[in-house]
Amino acid sequence: SVVAVQHLRERGGALINLGSELSDVAIPLQGAYVASKHAVKGFTDALRIELADEHAPVSVTLVKPAGIDTLFVEHAKNYLDHEPKLPQPVYAPEVVAEAILHAAAHPRRDIYAGGASRGMAWFGRSAPRAYDAMTSRLGVKAQLTSEPRRDGDSLYESGTGLSERSGRHGRVR
C-alpha cells in the first residue's frame, strides 16, 4: 500500500522477495516457473535500483532457494506420463525461513538458501554450455519418478489437506 511504502521511505526497512535458484538458471519441464522466477529477479533488481536512486533507507533482498520439501510438486499441473519429483538435494522449509529472517536483519542483495542453489547458479554462469549440456542430459530424468501419473487434477483438486511438506523427496537436508 502507499502508506506502507511511505513508512519505509521515512523509517527504513527491508523488502524481501522470494525467487529460486531458477531465477538464475533454467531446467527442463519447468519453463513457466523458470520464466516467473526470472521475472521476480528482474522486478527485485529494478526496485532495488529505484529505491537507491531515491536514497530510501530500504534493503531489497532476493532469497533464492534450491528445491524445498513443500507441496510444490503436488500442487503443479502434471501433463507427464509419470509422477514428477524435485531433483536432489531437497532442503527443509526451515532453511528458507532462516534465510528470510537473516535478510530482514542483515541487508544483502541476494541470499541463496541451500548450498545447491548457489552451486547451480555458479555453474550456469561459469560454464553455460556445460550447464546446458548436463541439464539437457540429466534434467528430465532427475525430475521424474517411476510411478505412473495419478488420476485427478493436482492443480485444482489437491488432496493434501493442510500439510506443509510432501515427504516424498527422499532425504531432506
Image (cartoon, rainbow, N blue to C red):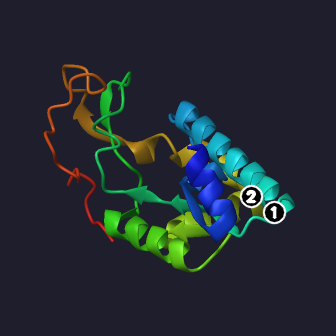
Placement of 129 over or under 35, stated as above or below: below
Name above or below for residue 2 compared with residue 77: below
Asked if 11 appears above or below 134 in the picture, the reply is below
Residue at image coords 44%, 43%: 141
Q: Nearer the viewer, residue 36 or 103?
A: 103
Q: What SS does tag 2 mark?
A: helix
Verify CB contact (< 8 Å) between mark 2 and mark 1.
Answer: yes
- Mark 1 secondary-structure assignment: helix
Q: Please name the residue shown 72% across and 46% down the image.
A: 42
- Answer above or below: position of 126 versus 148: below
The quadrant of the rendering that contains the N terminus is top right
Residue 79 horizontal side relative to residue 137, left or right: left
Q: Which residue is mark 2?
A: 48
Q: Residues within 10 Å of mark 1 (few under 14, many from 20)?
A: some
Badge 2 density bin: few <14, some 14–19, many ≥20, Cα 10 Å: some
Gap in angstroms between the C-alphas marked 2 and 1: 6 Å
What is the x, y in percent for residue 34? 58, 40
Q: Mark on residue 52?
A: 1
Which of the 4 image quadrants contains residue 74? top left
Q: Quadrant of residue 59?
A: bottom right
The single residue placed furthest to the right in the displayed view is 53
Name the one closer to the observer, 50 or 133: 50
Q: Is residue 172 visible?
A: yes
